[in-house]
Image (cartoon, grey):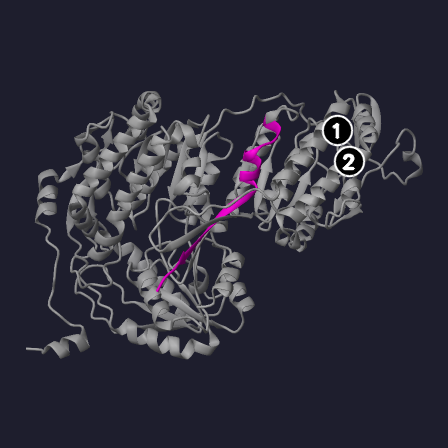
Amino acid sequence: MPTVSDILDSLDYGPAPEGTVEVRGWLAARGRFGHFIGGAFTAPVGLFDTLNPATGEVLAQVTQGTPADVAAAVAAARVAQPGWAALPGHERAEWLYALARQVQKRERFLAVLEVLDTGKPIREARDIDLPLVVRHFYHHAGWAEVLADQFPGAAPLGVCGQIIPWNFPLLMLAWKLAPALAAGNTVVLKPAEWTPLTALAFAEICAEIRLPAGVVNIVTGDGATGAALVAAEVDKIAFTGSSEVGREIRRATAGTAKRLTLELGGKSPFIVFADADLEAAIEGVVDGIWFNQGQVCCAGSRLLVAEAVADAFTERLRARMARLRVGDPLDKGTDIGAIIHPDHLARIGALVAEGQAAGAELVQAPAQLPARGCYCAPGFFTGAAPANPVSQREIFGPIATLTTFRTPDEAVQLANASCYGLAASIWSENLALALDIAARVKAGVVWVNSVNVFDAGAPFGGMRDSGFGREGGRAGMLEYLAWPAPAAVAEPEPAALVAAPDPTHPGAAGGIDRTAKLYIGGAQKRPDSGQSYAVRAGDRLLGLAPWGSRKDIRNAVEAAQKASGWAAMAGHARAQVLYFIAENLSARAAEFAARLAEAGQPDAQAEVQATIRRAFYYAALADKHDGRIPATRARHLTLVQPEPHGVIGIACPNAAPLLGLASLILPAIAMGNRVVAIPAQDMPFAATDLAQVFDCSDLPGGVVNLVTGPRDDLVAVMACHDDVNALWVCGTKAGAARAQADSAGNLKPVWVMTNRDWQGASGQGQAFLDHAVRLKTIWLPFGA
């Protein structure tokens, strides 16, 4: 028999399995599950097996959802939605509170069921997932209670389709469902094909508390069921899953009025500086990558370690990895449980083989894997080149890569050398350094000296191939609310462009009184194509405008990228430039009004004066778009910081050629973005005249770039451009739909708006500022 000292040295002790009698009894009593639609379960038909990944045993049989099932669920949700939305916020809060209490009473049952269905260690389900599930329902019960005060005038979207992944089935359900219900929406939720059981158990809880029928509907099935939900008559799709499927959903919803939130994959950097507490950082690797089998989209799977401590870190990491226990996830002493499914295990193995074939060396723990079930020993790659598949692709398993760096700048460069932008973890005892890196790394969530910290009060979400939109906190509530849309104002369709001869040609002089140029990088330039098009007011030729091309867009984006110093300026400094623009425009107001009147624009003088006021308005707000410090976990300072997207592509309305342009450009640059704008196609001279004002107002070159020409074609180019970080489109429905579909390649957020009364209240406001920024959540633990 081993002595106490032997046990403390080896950390080897007997099994401590969690009991499963209650859960297995529940499964045996039901055996086969239908959908939960309209407050009741349907008859189970078209069944498929759901397996325990730790053993391969069949746990239950679940119904494969059809388009007809989805349609029935959406219809039930649609019927229930007006009544649910009409409830006072206090009553919806009571329902959410009841859900929280019932889940809380069944925490151990649900934790064990989650382990059987997912293969994750019981410690993760019991100590992390279930408390967060309860927290989300309590937190959003609070939002329901104060909704009218905190979001005056807001209304629910309607029926929300929600598709959740297999790595956190119950937590993702709560994460999405709680804010939707608090806002007054009803829901059709599709759990992952491999992990539907806790969602079905939650459906029983909804029935037990007599939640109004149709408020929550759950339809099980595979990807085809999810596709049917995306295509259904819902008002919003919230999806968490792979980037590939996210792109398909972006294309499928393009041109529709459906709101969209995408929380997608990640390849998150885990940056360890030389002054870091190495033991703490190694435990961060264990908690962030290995403890959850690496099956977390925000896992810090790219270890970036300062060269000065790389050898010591690697040696300690090997030793810690060798002590990890891989085995029965129900055992309270297990560190690493089972991989979700044989197919996913095979995918991990194939990607690991690719990495080795490309020259990387795999360091893997000599773990004794169970004889049956889906298991993978933890490990990490060394010597993986940046282009190696394991350096770029999401492994989604307990395998990381380890790369060294020498300077903070190199660390940032390596951290951002990924198409993803979900999360990052930074380890340093120098708080100034850690915050500097947090500001520079491209990620929606940054943990300082911590990893995988979540709370219902903090926004979570990514950028680039990690998707767009936020879940959690105030930002998460905004994703499920809408304000009355501004009254759409009919806009004349742009006239077909007619190529005009080169104005320098002798035969081109007659009747042409002006020739404009593109405005790129603070200078006026001829279009790359050498072509122009005629701009007319009725039968009268006003002049020639440049016919911008793909290359002109590329040049404009490059100029905007070089003007990155604009984002680094203080809001007060940007405000001074906007005030200067207003002042210089005011000095030339009569000239601008005459140009607009010449083009047949009604109320030309009023439009110029409104443009001047708009510049003052956004100058006033340039230094007033504050971040937040939400109340989250104890002994954590959580910063929610708005930051500019970078380069925003803007398609301006054909109406109000001066005011419409200014109303879109000004809020974007006020928040620190740079802009590539397509002015009003039928009257671009208002924009080219405004460029002269920019030149004499201390606006740095490249902050605003103007490319005239065929609006929809040029916007499509920007939608495909990887260095255009967001897109605003006020144009034709066909052009907007094309931009949304084309943006699926790089998953940039696209804001589609209708033409409106630009001189009225709908022409300015908080919505423009909100769309001009993305939120970065930075977690700072404090105390000894």
Q: CA distance from mark 1 to mark 2?
A: 8 Å
The circle on residue 585 is: 2
- 783 part of magenta stretch: yes
The percent position of residue 41, horizontal first and vertical second, equals 19, 30
The magenta segment: 762-784
On screen, residue 542 versus residue 10, left or right, reads right
Residue in view at x 44 percent, y 40 percent:
475
- 114 part of magenta stretch: no
Q: Residue furthest right?
A: 506
Say if 603 sits above or below 399 in the image.
above
Q: Quadrant of the C terminus?
A: bottom left
Say whether disc 1 or disc 2 marks the residue closer to the N-terminus. Answer: 2
The residue labelled by disc 1 is: 608
On screen, residue 222 versus residue 536, left or right, reads left
The reply to whether residue 417 is in sight is: no
The percent position of residue 159, horizontal first and vertical second, equals 37, 28
Task: Say which quarter of the image contains residue 710.
Answer: top right
Q: Amino acid at mark 1?
A: Val
The reply to whether residue 556 is in sight is: yes
The circle on residue 256 is: none
Pointers 1 and 2 in contact (C-beta within 8 Å): yes
Residue in view at x 85 percent, y 39 percent:
502
Q: Amino acid at mark 2?
A: Leu
Residue in view at x 94 percent, y 37 percent:
506
